[in-house]
Structures are given as C-alpha cells and as structure tokens.
Image: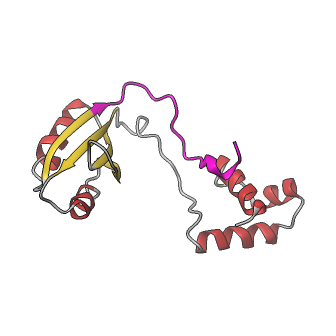
Amino acid sequence: MDELDRTILQFLQQDGRKPFTEIAQKLDISEGTVRNRVSRLIEDDILRIVGVADPVKLGFTVSSVVGVSVQGGDIDKIGKKIATFPEVNDVIMVSGEFDLILIVYCRDREHLTTFLKQSLRPILGISRTQTFIVLSSFKSNTDMHPLTDF
C-alpha cells in the first residue's frame, strides 16, 4: 500500500459513496486508476465499504461496555458465542482485569437487564461481568487515523 492508496482511503472514509470520478479529479489521476486501486484494496481485505447506522436513531438508546471474566472456559469459544447475540456490536479479547470487552446496544435499561440475565450470565465459563452504561460519547467514528502521520 502506497501513499496514493492511503489518500484514496481517506476520501472513502469521509464518504464511502464518493464517486471515483471526483476522487480522480481531486488527485489528478484517471478514474480507472482509482477504480483499480479500490478493487485491489477490497480484494486484499484492506478495505470494506459499508453503511454505518446510528443505533440511537434506530431506537437503541442504551449503549454499554461490558467487561467479562472467563474462568475454566475456552475464551475463544465463549467470545464466539457472545458474538452471536444481536445486542452485541463488538467482542474484543483484552489483557487486564477482564478477558473480553463487549460493546452492547439495547433499546432501554430493561432490555439491557434481560440481555445480561438471560443471555450473557448463563454462558458456562463466565465467572464475572461488569457493566458500564455509556452516559456520553466524546468521540465515536469509523475513521482509521493511523492512515496519516500525526
């Protein structure tokens, strides 16, 4: 991946639907070059172009971060099981106090309570959870800033 690929990625991070003709014009290259570069980035699994929905506008007003401790269980198996729940947006294996960190979106506090009690806690191998309800978010985006030098 070279500097041109990074620049094309920056345009697509701002607007994944930006026409290749506009990108080409701004970079003074051909549309075919942009199209070929984007196709290669997609084929190499460097780039995915997806729609990102706002969970709050979809009615999921309670977001939370859940720390999960695993004891006597297979962390990979448990992580994959947790990943099947529709409320769970991210499952991340981490070092530190918890083994897994989850990002969870629920309709309301009752939905979160039901998810924790009926879906998460019954999984064999989970020894403890701690839930942090998100009160405010100061930054949340899909941009990959390491594309640029700081």
Quadrant in the picture for the C terminus: top right
Name the residue rendered at 21%, 59% in the picture. 78
The x and y percentages for residue 136 are 42, 25
Magenta residue span: 132-150
The x and y percentages for residue 141 are 54, 41
Asked if residue 145 lies in the magenta stretch, the reply is yes
Asked if residue 75 lies in the magenta stretch, the reply is no
Left or right: residue 128 versus residue 96 is left
Q: Quadrant of residue 44?
A: bottom right
Depth check: give the residue in front, 130 or 96: 96
Up the image or down, 138 lies above or below 112; here it is above
Name the residue rendered at 23%, 46% in the picture. 68
Name the residue rendered at 74%, 65% in the picture. 2
Name the residue rendered at 20%, 47% in the picture. 69
Q: Quadrant of residue 93?
A: bottom left
User: What colour-coding does the image apply?
Assistant: secondary structure
Up the image or down, 50 lies above or below 87; here it is below
Left or right: residue 9 versus residue 98 is right
Left or right: residue 138 versus residue 68 is right
Depth check: give the residue in front, 66 or 128: 128
Q: Quadrant of residue 63?
A: top left
Q: How many marks?
A: 0
The x and y percentages for residue 15 are 66, 49
Depth check: give the residue in front, 61 or 130: 130
The x and y percentages for residue 41 are 64, 69
